[in-house]
Image (cartoon, grey):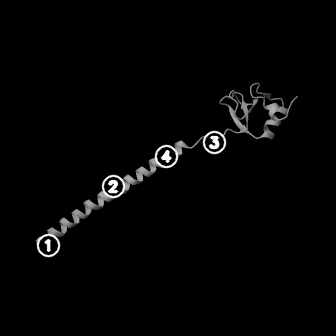
């Protein structure tokens, strides 16, 4: 009877090794899928720039200082996306138009 128990224990240990190997293979497949998903995310093109930007100054309250067309090369880090109406309103309130991209011309707003 003891020999039967030894044989059963050996079979169970073998089964455990097979299951651990299968578990590791499954974990490897999961890792590969996660890497592929991350790579796909990195390949996605960046979102298009907003149509209009309003550049804000430095300091408390950060007033608007310049209006830009969304793809303007002369923007700074203090720009926020804006709608066409918000850009027109800013120009009407006296905020400067960028001399490079001329949002006042693009919006049909000239002094």
Determine the residue positioned at 14% across, 68% down.
6
Cα separation between marks 2 and 4: 21 Å
Determine the residue positioned at 85% across, 34% down.
108
Determine the residue positioned at 29% across, 57% down.
21
Tag 1 secondary structure: helix
**Tags 2 and 4 in contact by the CB under 8 Å rule?**
no
19 w.r.t. 100: above or below: below
Mark 1 or 3 closer to N-term? 1
Q: Position of residue 40 (x, y in %)?
A: 51, 46
Mark 2 or 1 closer to N-term? 1
Residue ID for mark 1: 4
Mark 2 or 3 closer to N-term? 2
Q: In this view, does 1 lie to the left or right of 17?
A: left
Q: Where is residue 42 in the image (x, y as percent from the top left)?
A: 52, 42
Residue extending farthest bottom: 1
Residue ID for mark 2: 24
6 w.r.t. 21: above or below: below
Cα separation between marks 2 and 3: 38 Å
Cα separation between marks 3 and 4: 17 Å
Tell me the quadrant of the picture where the N terminus can be found: bottom left
Cα separation between marks 2 and 1: 30 Å
Q: How crowded is mark 2: few (under 14 residues within 10 Å), some or many (20 or more)?
A: few
Cα separation between marks 1 and 3: 67 Å
Mark 2 or 4 closer to N-term? 2
Q: Which of marks 2 and 3 is in front?
A: 3
Tag 3 secondary structure: loop
Residue ID for mark 3: 47
Is 87 in front, or is 100? 100
**Tags 2 and 3 in contact by the CB under 8 Å rule?**
no
Residue ID for mark 4: 38
Mark 1 or 4 closer to N-term? 1
48 w.r.t. 7: above or below: above
């Amino acid at each position: 009877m003891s020999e039967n128990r030894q044989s059963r224990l050996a079979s169970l240990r073998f089964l455990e090794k097979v299951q651990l190997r299968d578990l590791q293979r499954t974990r490897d497949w999961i890792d590969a899928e996660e890497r592929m998903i991350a790579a796909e995310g990195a390949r996605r093109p960046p979102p298009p720039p907003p149509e209009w930007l309003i550049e804000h100054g430095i300091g408390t309250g950060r007033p608007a200082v310049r209006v830009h067309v969304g793809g303007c090369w002369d923007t700074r880090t203090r720009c926020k996306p804006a709608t066409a109406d918000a850009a027109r309103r800013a120009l009407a309130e006296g905020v400067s138009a960028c001399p490079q991209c001329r949002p006042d011309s693009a919006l049909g707003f000239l002094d």
